[in-house]
Amino acid sequence: MNIMWKNRVVLAAAVLCTAIVGLSACSVPEESTGPGAGAGQGGDSTLLGIVTISATDANNARVIEGATQAAEEAGWTVEVVDAAGNADQANTAIQNFVNKGAGMVFNLVFPASSLGAGLNAASQADIPVATWGGGPGDGIAVVAGDGAPFAEPATQALIDALDGEGQVLALTYRTGQVCRDREALFDEMMAEQAPDVVVTKNEVNIPGFLQDGARYANAWLAANPEGSGNLAVWGCWEDPTLGAISSIKQQGRTDVLTYGINGSSTAIKAVQDGDLTATVFEDARAEGAKMFEETLDAIDSGDFTPRTVDVPGILVTSDTIDAFLDEHPEALD
């Protein structure tokens, strides 16, 4: 709206208000300011909208918990939408938050390349978007949860244990950027360090990853009976591996190593019980809180140049579980 036209609107409103002042109260429109201002009717610039690929996934839940605590301590409100692995639903959710005039939006795991409509709407409304596990891209102001580095310690432990030969069941998920990046690193490391190891890949679904992990493991175990050599299951996060473990235990197998990534409380307990060989603990609560702090800083400074949140992962095995829990007792929560 150009200045002359806007002034005419304000003047007309003032004249109308004067004419009817004895009938009702009215106000002259003022220009809104700040992130998300004017994006929707009744906009709330202290609303954090979170769009997650899966609200039931333990690490997604931890990110939400950390971000929510930090936001509420700063006087913000939080709304969460579970898009259940559907990028179209995620785009719609982001657009809805834009229409509400949210102050910032978080995307959990969906790749930036699959969120064109939502990110464009947020950009047009000057609403910063932070991503956890979605990777960098146009319209992303803060990047956290870079998937690949967290995969390195668990993958290296698997390679060392196999000693150059054997069979691996790799449980993947290509809708989420985190798993795409972790799978790419897994492929690279296996090709460089264990080229003779045979890898069987199966992609799980969200929802349904536990069931898929168990189902794929059943078929793979049947093809690799005891005495087949070195055997291991690798999951791009540990929940599919936990599904595979249920089949391994049901069949009474003790010859299969199991690896995951993220360090959910269930996974940490599985390492403690000897069911999961290793996982990588990702302090997702700290990442969620840091995402909010960095995005708020971007808003305060007006600088939306992409920035990265880096919280290193910790390899957890049966040899290190006790020391790990002494330092991180909250990991079992």
Image: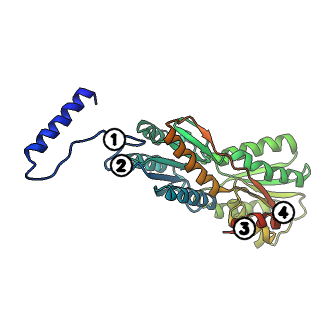
Q: Secondary structure at mark 1?
A: loop
> 79 left or right of 189?
left
Sort mark 3 into few (<14), some (14-19) or many (20+) by Cα contacts within 10 Å.
few
What is the distance, in whole Å, between disc 4 and disc 2 at their CAs? 49 Å
Question: Can you identify the residue that label 1 sits on?
Answer: 32
Mark closer to the chain start, 3 or 1: 1
Mark closer to the chain start, 3 or 4: 4
Is label 1 in contact with label 2 (beta carbons under 8 Å)? yes
Can residue 301 be seen here? The reply is yes
Is label 3 in contact with label 4 (beta carbons under 8 Å)? no
Residue drawn at x 12%, y 53% as measured from the top left? 24
Find residue 17 and report its horizontal and vertical position in percent.
13, 44
Q: What amino acid does circle 1 point to?
A: Ser
Q: Secondary structure at mark 2?
A: loop
What is the distance, in whole Å, between disc 3 and disc 4 at their CAs? 13 Å
Question: Can you identify the residue that label 2 sits on?
Answer: 43
Mark closer to the chain start, 3 or 2: 2
Mark closer to the chain start, 1 or 4: 1
What is the distance, in whole Å, between disc 1 and disc 2 at their CAs? 10 Å
- Discs 3/4, front: 3
Is label 4 in contact with label 2 (beta carbons under 8 Å)? no
- Discs 3/1, front: 1
Q: What amino acid does circle 3 point to?
A: Pro
What is the distance, in whole Å, between disc 3 and disc 2 at their CAs? 40 Å
Q: What amino acid does circle 4 point to?
A: Thr
Question: Can you identify the residue that label 4 sits on?
Answer: 320
In terms of depth relative to the viewer, which is nearer, 169 or 286? 286
Question: Can you identify the residue that label 3 sits on?
Answer: 329
Mark closer to the chain start, 1 or 2: 1
